Amino acid sequence: MDRSIKLMGAIALAATAACGTDPISPSNSSAAGNPANSAAASTNNVVVTESDVSRQAEDTPPLRNWVFYFRSPTSTGAFVWGPGNPPLGVGSFEMGTALATDKGTLFNYDHVGTALTDITRIGYATYRDGSSAATSPSYQLPSINIEVDYNGPTVAGGYTSLVYEPIYNVDASAIVANTWQTWNAIPGIWWSTRPINGCAVTPCYQPWSTIVANNPNAAILGGFGVNQGSGSGGLIAATDALSIGHGGSTWTYNFEPFRSPTSKNDCKDGGWETLKAADGSSFKNQGQCIKYVHESQES
C-alpha cells in the first residue's frame, strides 16, 4: 500500500478511536490543516508537558496530537528542568540515543494538510549536553523533521520526510556544547529522505525555497517535530521553542516539566493539584494557587 495512504489512514483511524476522549487527539480539523488546539491559534507560546504526549513505538498510528516515537532498546525522551537557561520557561525536551541504532522523535500532528507554500516560519532551539559520548560527533544535534506529500493529495504516492540539521547550515565550529542555540530553518538548507521533484538521487541539500518551488503542491502529511537518531549514538541533547508559522499565525511550543496556572479558573475543580509554581513547588490548596496567579499577573 502507498505510504501516504497508509499514513493518512492511520491518522484518521486514530482520530476515530480517540474522538470524544482526548481533547488533543488527531482530529478532523487538524487533518484539514487547521490546528486542532484552538487555544494555540490565539497564543504564541503553547506549553507542552508529559500529560500531552502519547509514548509509542515507531511506525505506529498516532494516538494523540503529540507523540514521542521511540526505537528500542535504549532511546529516551523526557520533559526536564533546564538544562541551563532554556529560551522559554524553565524546561525543555531532552532525548538520549545511547546506540547508533537508537531513534527518538517528538511529533505534533496539528498542522496536517498545511501547504508548504503557506509556511512562513520554522525554527527551534537546541542544547547539546557536554556529557554526550565521544562516539557522537561534536556537530550532532536533534533535527527538525516534517512528513510531507511532495506531489499533493490528488496524485498517488509522494511520501517523504524533509529534514533540517544545523550542521548543513553552519560550520561545525559554530555548534557548541552546554549552550542553547537558536536555529531559523527558513531560510535554510534541508534534505529529503526520498527522491522528490528537483532531487532525483538523495540526499540533495537544498534551500527551503528551492524545495518549495520545485514541489508547489507539497503539503504536510503527518508529523512535524524534532528527531534524534541515525548516527547519533551517545548523543544527549535538548530542544525547546519549536515553532511553525502559516496562515498569519505562529505557534511556538514551549516544552516544560510541568504546567503552571495562568488564570484562577486553572486552579478550580481540583486543577491546583496538578499544577506547580514556576519554581516547581506544588500548591497546598486552591486558594494558594489563585493567589499565585494574582501575584504573577501583578509582577
Image (cartoon, rainbow, N blue to C red):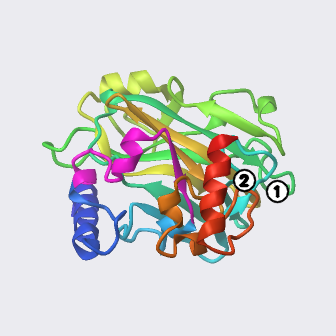
Q: Measured along the vertical axis of the image, is residue 79 above or below residue 124?
A: below
- Which mark is first along the chain, 2 or 1? 1
Q: Nearer the viewer, mark 1 or mark 2?
A: 2
Residue at (58%, 70%) from the top-left corner? 272
The image shows residue 149 at horizontal and vertical percentages of: 28, 44
Q: Magenta segment, which residues?
A: 29-49
Query: Per the image, is 171 magenta?
Result: no
User: In the image, 246: left or right of 299?
Assistant: left
Residue at (22%, 49%) from the top-left corner? 157
Instruction: Return the mark for residue 98.
Output: none
**Quadrant of the image containing the C terminus:** top right
Residue indicated by mark 1? 132
Q: Residues within 10 Å of mark 2 (few under 14, many from 20)?
A: many
The amino acid at mark 2 is: Ala
The image shows residue 209 at horizontal and vertical percentages of: 41, 22
Q: Residues within 10 Å of mark 1 (few under 14, many from 20)?
A: many
User: In the image, 85: left or right of 245?
Assistant: right
